[in-house]
Image: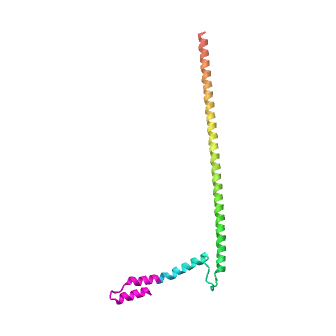
């Protein structure tokens, strides 16, 4: 009513017509029902007690809805827990496979080293035997 009075005042005072005031009135009339509905809905959902004479017809629906939501949340938590356990098992398996690959690689490297060492020792033994034989020949030739 104050806004309508403001429009009337400016219109009759001779200053002209202000469309901004009409737009403000329109905006307030459009948004007030939505805002009041949201405020009431939030109060109801949070459990604010109703007036004494009002009978709550949504109580049974609300209880069923709460049960459904609770069951859904429990299912989602179970699914999430199973997913986490699956990921942990996959991580363990990956870790074990990596350890096995590392062990196999180390074993093959150790075998390669041992083969190289035996080959080097055989070559060293052969070269020592050749040197000894050559020394023996030289000694025999000198005698």
Q: Out of 28 and 82, give the one closest to the viewer.
A: 28
- Residue 24 in which image quadrant: bottom left
Q: Nearer the viewer, residue 63 or 16?
A: 16
Q: How many labels does the image show?
A: 0
- Percent across and percent down for residue 140 are 61, 12
The quadrant holding residue 2 is: bottom left
18 left or right, relative to 106: left
- Tell me: residue 37, above or below residue 86: below
For the point 45% across and 81% down, the residue is 27
Spot occupied by residue 9 in the image (x, y as percentages of width and height): 37, 88
Q: Which residue lies furthest to the front in this view?
A: 52
Q: Where is residue 122 in the image (x, y as percent from the top left)?
A: 63, 27
Image quarter hosting the C terminus: top right
What kind of secondary structure does the magenta stretch mostly adopt? helix
Rendering colour mode? rainbow
Of all residues shown, which one is farthest toward the top? 143
Q: Quadrant of the N terminus?
A: bottom left
Quadrant in the picture for residue 135: top right
Residue at 64%, 59% (x, y): give it: 84
Residue at 35 percent of width and 90 percent of height: 12
Farthest-out residue, bottom: 12
Q: Nearer the viewer, residue 129 or 65?
A: 65
Q: In percent of the image, x 63 and y 51: which residue is there?
A: 94
Position of residue 111 relative to residue 20, above or below, is above
Residues drawn in magenta: 1-28
Within the magenta stretch, is there residue 80? Answer: no
Observer-nearest of 80 and 106: 80
């Amino acid at each position: 009513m104050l806004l309508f009075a403001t429009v009337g005042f400016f219109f009759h005072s001779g200053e002209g017509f202000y469309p901004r005031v009409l737009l403000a009135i329109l905006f307030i009339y459009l948004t007030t029902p939505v805002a009041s509905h949201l405020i009431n809905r939030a109060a109801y959902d949070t459990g604010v007690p109703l007036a004494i004479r009002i009978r709550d017809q949504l109580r049974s629906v609300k209880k069923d809805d709460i049960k459904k939501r609770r069951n859904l949340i429990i299912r989602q938590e179970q699914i999430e827990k199973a997913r986490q356990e699956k990921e942990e098992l996959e991580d363990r398996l990956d870790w074990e496979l990596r350890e096995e690959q590392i062990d196999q690689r180390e074993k093959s490297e150790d075998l390669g080293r041992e083969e190289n060492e035996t080959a080097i020792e055989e070559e060293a033994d052969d070269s020592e035997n050749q040197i000894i034989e050559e020394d023996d020949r030289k000694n025999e030739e000198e005698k």
